[in-house]
Image (tube, rainbow, N blue to C red):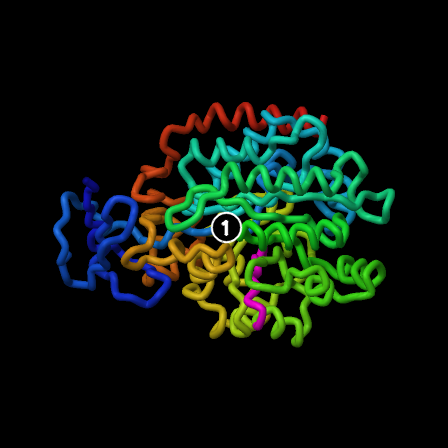
Amino acid sequence: MSTRTWIRDPLAIFTANDDDAGGGLVLDGATIAELVPAGSTPTVPYDSEFDARSHVVLPGLINTHHHFYQTLTRAWAPVVNVPLFPWLVNLYPVWARLTPRDLELATTAALAELLLSGCTTAADHHYLFPGGMEESIDVQVSVVRRLGMRAMLTRGSMSLGEDDGGLPPQQTVQEPEVILADSERLISRYHERGDGAQVQIALAPCSPFSVTTEIMKESSALADLHDVRLHTHLAETLDEEDFCRERFGLRTVDYLDSVGWLGPRTWLAHGIHFDDSEVARLGEAGVGVAHCPTSNMRLASGICRAVELEEAGVSVGLGVDGSASNDASNLILEARQALYIQRLRYGAEQATPERALGWATRGSAAALGRPDVGELAVGKQADLAMFRLDDLRFSGSHDPLSALLLCGADRADRVMVGGQWRVEDGAVVGLDLEGLIAEHSAAARRLVG
C-alpha cells in the first residue's frame, strides 16, 4: 500500500495551472492525490506530513535541450569568444576523442547539476558516435536510472561530413543504415510509454548542416512507425539560414516541411530566426520549441521570439543547451535568463516570472509530449522542486515566487521524482559529489590535452 504525505502550508506554491494549493498537496505514492486550498486541510486521509513553511514549491523543472557530454569542455579557451560555426569546428575533433567512461562521468555531472537546480526531467541530444562509442545512449540510460530522474534521450546523428559539404569532420559521421538500425534497437530496448515513464527515446538528426535530407526523411518515417518524438536544431543562427538557402534552396521551416517534420511530434532547439509567417505555421502544426537563452547569448545567436511563438500555439519550453555553450546545467537560472532576455524583446508586462516558470514546467512538458508532468494537479506525477529563501540574496524580498528568479535562486533544497526524494538538504541522495568532481575534472583535462 502506498503512503500518503501532506506537503503542508508552503511559503509559496506555483502549480503552473492557477489552481489554489496554498495549503499544500497530498502525495499518494508516485502521484498527486489532492491540492489543498489555502487555509484548509486535506479531505483525503494521509499518513505523514512535511512542513513546507520555509519552502517555495514548484513542479519539477523540465529541461528540453541539452548535450550532457559537453560538461567536459566548459569554458575551453579556444572557443570562448567565437560564434556557433567556428565554435563547432574547433570542438568536433575534441569530442571525437570521447570514451564511454568520459560520457558516463559527463552525464552524471550534468544530471546531478540539473537535479540540484530543481530539474526532474531532462532531454539530451547526443549525436556523437565515434569508434568505441556505439552504445552511448545505453551509458546514459544507466546513469538516469541510477540517479532516479526522468529523461528523454534522443538518438542523435550526423551523416553529412565536411567531404560532402557539411560541417562535421568525417570521423564523426555515420552511414544512414547504421543510424536507423541503432534507433530501432534503442526504441525497442528502452522506450517507456504512458504516465510515469522514466526513460523515453526520440530521434534527433543533429542539424541541417550535419545531416542529409535522406536521414531526416527516414527518421520521420521511423518516428511515425514507432510513435516516438523528433528533435533537431533549427533556426539557431543566420549562418544556418544561409546554409539552408544555398544547399536546399529553402528557408528553415520550408526545409522542415520538405522532410516531413512539420508536425506535433517535433520539438526544435533554439528556434530563433523565424519570420511572422513561420511562427504562425509552427503554431498551426503543433511544433514545440526549446528556448535556450543562455546559450543564445553566449554564442551571440539571437533572441527567440518566445512570447509570439507561444501565442501562436507553439509549446515553448526551456533548455540549458550544452554545457560548453552555457556553460552550466542549471534550469532555475535558465528561467531567470529567459525572463530577462524576453523582457528586452517584449517588455516587463509580457515577460513575467510566472510566464518564465511556466515555460520551465508546463511548457517544457508539452514540448516533450509529457502530459503527466510539469504541473501540480491531481493525478500528475509527484515531481517537486522545493527552494528555501533564507540566503542573504533573498533578505528583504517580499514576493517569494518572484524572488526565486529576481534574486537569483540557483539551488533547490529538496527535489522529489515520482514520490522519492532525490535531493535532500541541498545534496543529491547517494552521490559522492566530491569524488565525481575529481574524476570528471581529470577526464576533462585528458580530453583537451
Is any part of residue 300 visible from this angle?
yes
Q: x and y percent of residue 79 in the render?
A: 73, 42
Is any part of residue 397 visible from this angle?
no
Magenta segment: does it hold 140? no
Dot 1 amino acid type: Asn
Between 159 and 388, the one lying in front of the other is 159
Q: x and y percent of residue 211 in the render?
A: 75, 49
Q: Residues within 10 Å of mark 1 (few under 14, many from 20)?
A: many
Q: x and y percent of residue 198 in the render?
A: 42, 42
In the image, is 113 to the left or to the right of 280?
left
In the image, is 401 to the left or to the right of 6?
right
Q: x and y percent of residue 364 in the render?
A: 48, 57
Quarter of the image where the C terminus is located: top right
In the image, is 241 to the left or to the right of 105?
right
Between 312 and 14, the one lying in front of the other is 312
Magenta-colored span? 284-294
With respect to residue 20, does 78 lie above or below? above
